[in-house]
Image (spheres, rainbow, N blue to C red):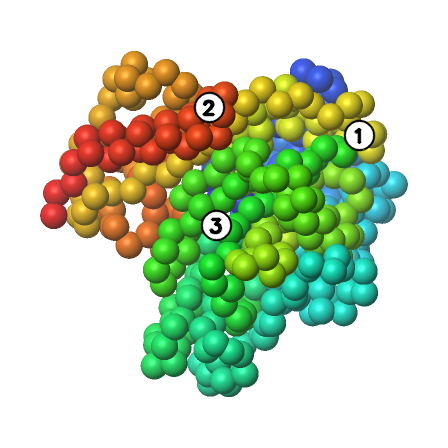
Amino acid sequence: MGYNNTRLADVKKLETYARELHGAELVLCKDGITATDRETVRHCLDNDLAATEENIDSIIAHLGSHALELVGVLPFSDHGVPAGALLASRLGLPGADPAAAACAADKHLYRAREARHDTLPGHHRTIRAREIHTADDAVAFWHEVAPRRIFLKPKGEGNSRGCTRVEDEAHIGSAFAGLSPYLAGGVMAEECVDGAREYSVDHVAGFSWLTEKTTTTGAYRAEIEQVVPAPLAPPTAGAVRRSGYAAAEICGYAGSAFHNEVFLLAGDRGTAVVEPNLRPAGMRIWDLAALAFDFDPWTAWLDHSRSGTALPAPPRQRGYAGIRMLRPRADGFLASLPQVADVHERFPGLHEVVFTKAVGDPVSTRVENNADFVGHVICAAPTHQETRALLLACTRAIEESTEVTA
């Protein structure tokens, strides 16, 4: 059911696994099927992913007209979660509760349900939020929260798009204007959470792990690094995990994939959910888990979506794995990039270097969301400390070798 941003390669991976492991075909269902989609995936269905009975009828009719029997549903995009839950429910397949799954695609709806949830852990703090339609709405919310700092974000976008921190009332108007591309889908304001460390609770087929997240600083917050698993002491890890599972339950989770982002608040003040996602994690976190543990989350997801069964035993940890994004050193246009083979030769433990910008592309040191980076590196090592040091050394070397012309 759809894919977020540039994750078509992951869809192709799922198609390959479906054929090899299940003797099954994968159907990509999304709004606005592109020529690249059709070149990559054999079966494509152009559908707006609305969670309506009529829409589900059309999907089922399409499958029937191609003599395809549906054996599993994979909600892979945020917008595909509610429709995926409804489709699975209609056919008696494993999936989330359709009545609650909309919370995972609408951040404000999640906040409203979270505020009314009566079984949250004692350490779990709810974050105040309000849907806004005008800059004046944001100003009114600003005066209700203390200290007066707010965070503006779209209700239903991922990839850190549109997420803006506001620390001065005079800047609310310009910050709200920056959200104009997202007004049709709805925008919201939240109270800021300062001094917290961010993690995600990632889950598939009965197994969960914690991911350590690092974001950029400044007005815009983009995710620059992820490390699997997070090195937390058991009591702290347990608190973060319980909040992540609570968010999943609010969204109607029923044993499959989720990626719920959680703040560990400063001063031992508990935990707070940043946002919930009833889909696989982005930013290659599942591929990091496959390096850090002796299991493949992708095959586990396919198995669970078909049978509803969990992994027979918790996977064994091998070590740690991480991804770190590459930033340009100056504003301008990319003039040159280092040779990937040369970087691999210098750094044992480096698994992958990918450039998402090409020579000639415009780049900026002002990273507004995850798509503004130049690329990424993936590394693995026996310890958390070694993994982080390797990530920093690799990105530093590549960034220093990347040329930008003004």
Q: Relative to 32, is 127 above or below?
A: below
Q: Nearer the viewer, residue 346 or 175?
A: 346
- Residue 222 in the image: state x and y as whole percent: 41, 51
Q: Of the numbered discs in the image, which one, if any, rests on residue 310?
A: 1
- Residue 395 in the image: state x and y as whole percent: 31, 33
Q: Is residue 38 visible?
A: no
Q: Nearer the viewer, mark 2 or mark 3?
A: 2
Which of marks 1 and 3 precedes in the sequence?
3
Q: Relative to 68, is 117 above or below?
A: below
- Residue drawn at x 25%, y 46% is 363
Counting the numbered discs, the total is 3
- Give the image quarter of residue 63: top right
> What residue sits right under mark 2 in the picture?
380
At label 2, the amino acid type is Ala
- Residue 196 in the image: state x and y as whole percent: 51, 56
Q: With 15 as the anchor, is 207 left or right in this view?
A: right
Q: Nearer the viewer, residue 128 or 265?
A: 265
* Secondary-structure class at tag 2: strand
Callouts 2 and 3 close, C-beta under 8 Å: no
> What residue sits right under mark 3 in the picture?
159
At label 3, the amino acid type is Asn
* Secondary-structure class at tag 3: loop
Q: Is residue 405 visible?
A: yes
- Residue drawn at x 47%, y 72% is 150
At label 1, the amino acid type is Ala
Which of marks 1 and 2 precedes in the sequence?
1
Q: How much space separates mark 2 and mark 3, taking CA atoms?
A: 24 Å
Q: Quadrant of the N terminus?
A: top right
Q: Could you classify mark 2 by the number of other residues whose Cα lies within 10 Å: few (under 14), some (14-19), or many (20 or more)?
A: many
- Residue 367 in the image: state x and y as whole percent: 33, 52
Q: How much space separates mark 3 and mark 1, taking CA atoms?
A: 29 Å
